[in-house]
Amino acid sequence: MVQFIQNLIGNDKLATAILSFIPLIELKGGIIFARGVSLTFFESFALSYLGSTIAFIPVFFLLVPILSLLKKIKWFKTFADKIELYFKDKAADALETAAKNGKKAHTEKFYKLLGTFIFVAIPLPMTGVWTGTAVAVFLGLKFKDAVLPVVIGNFIAGTLISVLAEIILVGFGNIKILDYVLYGLLVLAAVLFVVVLIKILRKKKPLAEDK
């Protein structure tokens, strides 16, 4: 898999940044690929962090306008409504998680910031800058408020993945093991994409909206 990506793009550093920008793959895939092609620890982290963090800007400013545009097109309206509902549910879940981990004395805005941070910082499937930014948008955060939790959260996630990659390298003593990890990650990303798409398509509008 590493060799295929190398041949496809032709530049390891550029490939790292591009992979990190792609939703579902993001920071996790970028770092694993970079270490797999023998980029240094800091090169892998920096390029992956930069590529994934940049996604914050287009997602924040274009998500709602694109959904609004799709809603005006007959064939895409229902799908756009369901995507919006999906991310609203994610935003509600993030707010609930933050409220459970915070103190009652904090304001609602604090919980929104914390929820966004947690969503980005924990490097699990379906978390990261893309989903975390969408969560921030539907939580109603302003750009200047959402930047910090996304940037710091992505830094934390990058650190965790980088350390994990080093542990794998040291533990197995063979850089090719990262090729299998990357392949598994890409397969998982494809499966998750299908699962999320099915979940979105199966979502139903609240009864209040159906009337």
Image: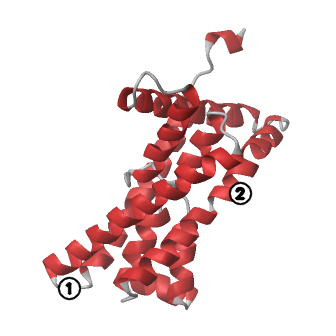
**Looking at the image, which residue is at 53% across and 81% down?**
15
Q: Characterize the local packing of mark 1: few (<14), some (14-19) or many (20 or more) Cα atoms within 10 angstroms.
A: few
Q: Position of residue 166 (x, y in %)?
A: 26, 76
Question: Horizontal placement of 57 versus 47: left or right?
Answer: right
SS for callout 2: helix
> What quarter of the picture does the C terminus occupy?
top right
Q: Is residue 89 above or below residue 146?
A: above
Question: Horizontal placement of 153 versus 32: left or right?
Answer: right
Which of the 4 image quadrants contains residue 51?
A: bottom right
Q: Characterize the local packing of mark 2: few (<14), some (14-19) or many (20 or more) Cα atoms within 10 angstroms.
A: few
Give me the disc on residue 58.
2
Q: How is the image coloured?
A: secondary structure
Q: Earlier in the sequence, mark 1 or mark 2?
A: 2
Which is more toward the observer, 5 or 95?
95
> What quarter of the picture does the N terminus occupy?
bottom left
Give me the disc on residue 174.
1
Kind of residue sitting beneath label 2: Pro
Kind of residue sitting beneath label 1: Asn
Q: Depth-wise, is mark 1 or mark 2 nearer the camera?
A: 2
SS for callout 1: loop
